[in-house]
Image: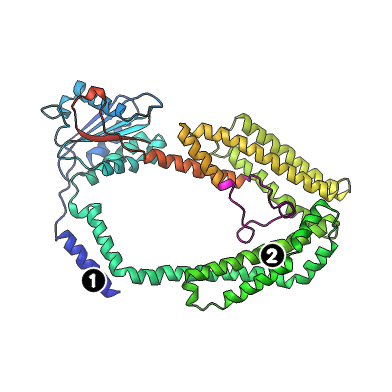
Amino acid sequence: MRRILTTLLLILIALTGGAGTAAAVTPDEVIIEDTAGVLDTNKLVPALESVEFREPTTVAVYTYNGPAGNEDGTVINAEVLRFARDEHPEWLSEDGQKWADGLFIFALDPTGRWTGTYFGEDRKISLDRQEDIREQAGDLFRAAQWTDGTITSVEEAAKLINRPWYLSPGAILIFIVAAIAAAGSVISYVVVRRNRRNKNRKLLTEADASYSSVTRDLDATEVNANSIPDDSSYGSRVLEEYRTFMTRYNKATELNNAAHALSEKDLMKSSSTAVIEEYADAAGELDGLDDVIADTNALLNKAPGWERAWDRQAGPLYEDLDRLDDLLDGKEAVAKGSATAQALLSFRQHTRENLAGASADLAENRMTPEQALDQIRAARSELSDLLKNHADTVISARAKTDSERRLMEKELEKVVEKPLRRGRGDYRPGIVDTAFPAYFYYTVGSFNTGIQQGTHSVEEARTSASSSTGYGSSGGSFSGAGSSGRF
């Protein structure tokens, strides 16, 4: 390892060539043209005056309110050029075809949600680096923190303008490649293989716990299964699952033996992960199924402990109802007062009442266990339909274009339609899930995750949208360095 570090240090010295750091100078001049009226100049001007560039630079900030919903980046570019020609001809080169030397312009359109960066020929940087400047403050601008976003953008520009070659991504990439080549084998062995071994050990421990529980309860599971009434719509379907129980248990035993035959060295191999995962899934499914068999017997026969069995069936639905509070009333809630939100609120209230009534009716024999389970199944179906409707409302509120809407819908579908893994994780199947394994429904948790991922994907797409470099038809032959992008 010492030899590797020594090699890396020599590579770094070779890359920098012993070059000294560039001089740090504050701007020659700071010009603020806040025609949009969104900046706090008392905070902005002192902050920009203290930013350190590598070369004397004039910093100009221009804001204006462009057209809302504008999708064309040339609009802000053309506006900055127009403003410079009309109000600040000194921002242009002598021939009027480029930006003046020593100049950096930052432009902001808070209404159209665009920012632009423009450079004199001796200060220009690549389009990728221009996009880096805009991305650095993207979250601030999306939160309408216009002054802080502007300061952050200028600070990022100062880091990138006239940056020495040895601090460029290309030089750093050369160093990284060399570092990987020198230390690759060590990283692979110490990090990757160690992590895989630890992951496999943890998963094996979890699988053993499930397998041991199933083994310990084998006799009880058989007794419970033999007591389930086969004339019940739920009981008959659960019994269908039990008929393959011992076959699946024997398979899990084989997987248990195979997993425990792996040596410490084997645990570092990816092929071992597949074996252990298969064992964990098999053991976990059986562990969930024997619990369902026990609950089915207790609930359908109203045997001792049936109340706890019922609570386990109703529990996930209660949890979904509780999660609706954050979905509809939390600080991140969208479309709170919409018709679809009101429908969910109404559903939450009457479903809580229905579940409480079902518990009482079961206790007083006014409702059969099958009817109570039917009620859970029907409530889940209704909740799923209501969440689908509310998803349309939320997506319509957050998406600005048809492409953003399709992106959010796709992300939501990927999450909510992902099959629940019965073997591992927090998910534990109930009687309804086991009796109707193909039964699909939305959960509030999956809905929230899908909306969050969809929103994140849309924000990323907005941030990474291609830069616009043109100056429109009014720009004529102007070819100054610069570009704009959405936030």
**Residue at the left extreme, as displayed:** 94
Q: Residues within 10 Å of mark 2 (few under 14, many from 20)?
A: many
Horizontal arrangement in the rendering, residue 455 relative to residue 225 (left or right): left
Q: Is residue 263 above or below residue 75?
A: below
Q: Position of residue 117 (x, y in %)?
A: 26, 36
Q: Residues within 10 Å of mark 1 (few under 14, many from 20)?
A: few
Horizontal arrangement in the rendering, residue 451 relative to residue 371 (left or right): left
For the point 30% across and 39% down, which residue is it? 151
For the point 50% across and 69% down, which residue is it? 271
Q: Amino acid at mark 2?
A: Asp
Q: Mark 1 = which residue?
A: 6
Q: Which residues are magenta?
A: 415-443
Q: Position of residue 298 (x, y in %)?
A: 82, 59
Q: What element does badge 1 sit on?
A: helix
Quarter in which the C terminus is drawn: top left
**Where is residue 127, by image quadrant?**
top left
Q: Is residue 184 above or below residue 65?
A: below
Whether residue 441 appears in magenta in the rendering, the answer is yes
The secondary structure making up most of the magenta span is loop
Q: What element does badge 2 sit on?
A: helix
Horizontal arrangement in the rendering, residue 172 relative to residue 28 (left or right): right
Q: Mark 2 = which residue?
A: 287
Whether residue 40 appears in magenta in the rendering, the answer is no
